[in-house]
Amino acid sequence: MDHSDIQKLVEISKMYHHQGLTQEKIANIFGISRSAVSMYLTEAKNSGIVQVQVKDPSINNRELAERFEKEFALRHCIVVPNGTHNDEVLLRVVNSQATRFAADLFVSHSSIGIAWGHTCYDFMQSFPSDTDLCDVSVVPMVGASPLLTQEHQLNESIRMFADKLRGYPLFIYAPGFVETLEDKRRLIESTFMQPVLDRWQNMDYAVLGIGKLQERDELRQFRCGGQNILEEIGKYSDLVVGDLCARRFNIKGEFIECDYNNKIIGVDGNILKATKNVMAIAVGSSKIFAIIGALRTKVIHYFVIDENTAKQVLNLLDSGSLPS
């Protein structure tokens, strides 16, 4: 096979596997038959130009997982192989393993708290409905957010999730954030909040996503990357790097005493620390600093993460660039 033939195999393979073009469209581009394209693709595979690798998400990278367990005193960590560059697909793959683990962890006649956000919504959507679980109460751990789209509205998601568990939902009729402390006091003391508050004190399980730093954060806003972020974190120990249940924390894992946190209608760090089983799920390199801060809070017992992000987290820790 000469160089021009090899180059044609490479070009056709890239169009088909990388660009997602159909064999018919490729045939039109090269002025050849569709069957010829199929033959080229087969030849590319047989000659080793194209290699097929199957990423089984059920295979847990125990070496990486054990490093996380040791570094952050976790009871169990699951590191899911990256089989896609699509973040939405990757989240579903990671959540498929998170729900598989959770289905074995949860028991009947118990209570589960769940946070807001895309990760937790996808977790509830992905959770199987054919388990033997029953009589499980489900409670939201933070009030509603105007930033959530209709499909992510917390109470409806909670109802759907409780149905899968053959249990019952507790709804929260309050915003996640209020303008004044007096508004918060009135809501917390209202009769419709009492069942939720009581349940928060007696949760058997909690499921969390890890929120990353947003540019709207009030303590400090910056738009930078790489080394600049490390410099910012080194200079300002109270810099927000992420949130759990909307409560902001720094890279040291300390929930920050600030006006924003004080006005949240939701569980606080003390409630999370008192919860027997707390599970967190995180995907993507944009959450590296948030993941480190979240795991340093010591409220998380079980953690599920994708492999690429896990490696980046450990590499950053190994670099010694972060305050401990």
Image (cartoon, rainbow, N blue to C red):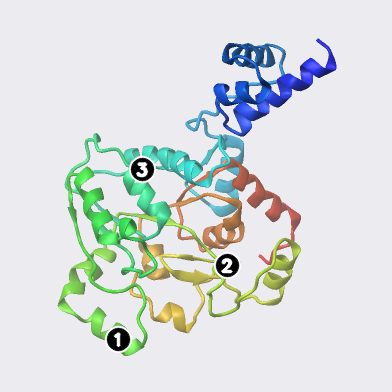
Front residue (pair 251, 215): 215
CA neighbours of label 2 inside 10 A, class few (<14), some (14 to 19), many (20+): many
Query: Which mark sits nearer the N-terminus, 2 or 1?
Result: 1
> Can residue 201 be spotted in the picture?
no
Q: Which mark is residue 241?
A: 2
> Can residue 236 be spotted in the picture?
yes
Kind of residue indicated by mark 3: Ala
Query: Which mark sits nearer the N-terminus, 3 or 2?
Result: 3
Front residue (pair 32, 116): 32
Q: CA distance from mark 2 to mark 1?
A: 27 Å
Instruction: Say if 301 sits above or below 32 in the image.
Output: below
- Please state the horizontal and vertical placement of residue 216, each as a whole percent of the image: 53, 74
Label 1, on which residue? 183
Query: Which mark sits nearer the N-terminus, 1 or 3?
Result: 3
The residue located at (65%, 26%) in the rendering is 29
Front residue (pair 257, 275): 257
Q: Is residue 7 left or right of residue 239?
A: right
